Image (cartoon, rainbow, N blue to C red):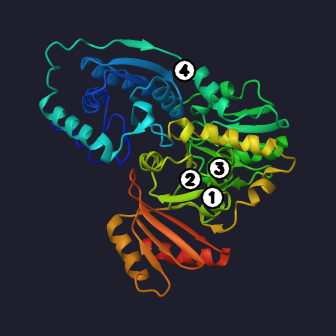
């Protein structure tokens, strides 16, 4: 029977429930298809701490080696550590993780050599087609004369840490006390090595690797998952807190008061630093739900802002197309030209630590200059029909004076004093709403009006 991949293969990754939606037999087919589509003679594979990850990664490796590709296994790693390996080794890569999703989920993030993205338009559709065909008819035998690939193991954690620390020097800054909540995810594996020897008093929280997430979901964008970190920052009198998601490619920042710092403010802060490193010029990519403050700060610092869709494969493609020096998303993904255009929350965290340690004021004061507007944060609504609800909102705003609409990604409506974006999730039956305005009252009014339409 042909596998139903319609709910498994997303716009820029593979993700679903194990074993209900996929298992090791399907992972093996994905490995074979990945090698065929990328024409790779060698690949690198890493995985997170979920119980199903080692088995799925091993099955993918079997599929790849059967097609003649040599496999380098880097074992437990963060997603940005896999991107580092893909870049440094110049190999296509596969990372087994479901990021912040619950324990029963798992997935694959794929990239070509140099951490170049694999999404729907860059190979993932072809991979899906092959896996669907092979799951029904069986995978064809490898080409005559194909020699099975080899499997080697390699630890790249130390090299990954050295690469990041070579890009941002915080050794000369004042000592800082930082609480890090790894959420039982891969930050517990990477943070100790990256931070070792730096002028940091590290307070670890939930560093034990546990893919069942016993303390809280490893999604720092959900406020309830920050409660423990916020309390610990205040209790410790720390300078800041950092929260990583399950695969540690996203980093969320908490200030000395225990207040969350908007990822848009972090994007603006890092953009200003990266522009300064590059002589006050360069292109910065931001997705369409980052704050108005991001393009403003980029222009103020001599850069050129470019607005794009949400999603790591789209951002990476725009990074490469424009030769951008940096990119940021409101979801706390941060992309760097000096990291193969890939996203690394760890490098963004080092930038924040360097900026804070390089001056005497608190983090709240430092980021205040970048946090200029009232934002709703991302609000999710479960809906039966995403297309129908989007159409209802579009109809409501299409004829309003002074409102412009665009559909670069979902629906964005922009007025003089506010904007909102409403877009469907690629991984869940949700509509995601972001609203921003020049003042809190306007933001609240727009937010409530749109939510009433979405949830009608």
User: Could you tell me which residue is drawn at 37 percent across and 26 percent down?
Assistant: 56
How far apart are the alpha carbons under marks 2 and 4? 29 Å
Q: Which residue is mark 3?
A: 275
Q: Quadrant of residue 158?
A: top right
User: Could you tell me which residue is drawn at 47 percent across and 37 percent down?
Assistant: 103
How far apart are the alpha carbons under marks 4 and 1? 34 Å
Q: Which residue is mark 1?
A: 298
Quarter the N terminus occupies: top left
Q: Which residue is mark 2?
A: 284
* Helix, strand or loop for disc 1: helix
Q: Is residue 401 visible?
A: yes
Image height check: is 440 above or below 112? below
How far apart are the alpha carbons under marks 3 and 1? 8 Å
Residues at discs 3 and 1 in contact (Cβ within 8 Å): yes
Mark before the other along the chain sequence, 2 or 1: 2
Residues at discs 2 and 3 in contact (Cβ within 8 Å): yes
Image height check: is 258 above or below 398? above
How far apart are the alpha carbons under marks 2 and 3? 9 Å
- Residue 162 horizontal/vertical position (percent): 64, 25
Q: Which residue is mark 4?
A: 156
Mark before the other along the chain sequence, 3 or 1: 3
Mark before the other along the chain sequence, 2 or 4: 4
């Amino acid at each position: 029977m042909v596998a139903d991949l319609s709910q498994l293969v997303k716009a820029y990754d593979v993700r679903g429930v194990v074993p209900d939606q996929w298992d090791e037999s399907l992972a093996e087919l994905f490995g074979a298809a990945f090698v065929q589509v990328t024409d790779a003679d060698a690949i690198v594979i890493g995985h997170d701490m979920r119980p199903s990850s080692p088995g799925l990664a091993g099955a993918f490796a079997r599929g790849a080696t059967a097609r003649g590709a040599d496999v380098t296994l880097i074992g437990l790693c963060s997603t940005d550590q896999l991107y580092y390996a893909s870049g440094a080794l110049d190999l296509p890569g596969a990372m087994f993780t479901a990021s912040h999703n619950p324990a029963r989920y798992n997935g694959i993030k794929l990239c070509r050599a140099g951490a170049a993205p694999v999404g729907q338009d860059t190979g993932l559709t072809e991979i899906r087609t092959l896996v669907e065909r092979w799951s029904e008819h069986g995978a064809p035998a490898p080409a005559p004369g194909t020699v099975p690939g080899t499997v080697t193991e390699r630890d790249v954690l130390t090299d990954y840490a050295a690469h990041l620390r070579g890009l941002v020097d915080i050794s000369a800054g004042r000592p800082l006390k930082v609480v890090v909540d790894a959420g039982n995810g891969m930050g517990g594996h990477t943070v100790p090595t990256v931070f070792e020897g730096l002028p940091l008093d590290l307070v670890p929280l939930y560093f034990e690797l546990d893919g069942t997430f016993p303390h809280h979901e490893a999604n720092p964008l959900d406020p309830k998952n920050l409660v423990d970190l916020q309390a610990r920052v205040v209790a410790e009198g720390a300078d800041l807190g950092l929260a990583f998601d399950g695969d540690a490619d996203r980093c969320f920042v908490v200030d000395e008061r225990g207040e969350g710092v908007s990822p848009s403010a972090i994007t603006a802060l890092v953009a200003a630093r990266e522009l300064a490193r590059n002589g006050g010029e360069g292109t910065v990519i931001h997705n369409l739900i980052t704050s108005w403050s991001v393009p403003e700060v980029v222009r103020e610092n001599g850069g050129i802002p470019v607005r794009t869709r949400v999603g790591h494969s789209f951002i990476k493609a725009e990074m490469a197309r424009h030769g951008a020096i940096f990119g940021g998303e409101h979801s706390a993904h941060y992309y760097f030209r000096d990291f193969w255009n890939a996203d690394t929350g760890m490098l963004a965290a080092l930038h924040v630590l360097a900026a804070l340690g390089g001056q005497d004021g608190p983090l709240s004061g430092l980021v205040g200059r970048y946090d200029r507007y009232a934002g709703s944060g991302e609000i999710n609504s479960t809906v039966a029909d995403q297309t129908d609800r989007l159409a209802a909102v579009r109809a409501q705003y299409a004829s309003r004076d002074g409102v412009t609409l665009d559909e670069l990604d979902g629906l964005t409506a922009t007025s003089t004093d506010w904007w909102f974006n409403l877009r469907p999730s690629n991984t869940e039956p949700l509509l995601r709403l972001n609203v921003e305005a020049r003042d809190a009252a306007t933001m609240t009014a727009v937010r409530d009006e749109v939510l009433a339409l979405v949830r009608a």
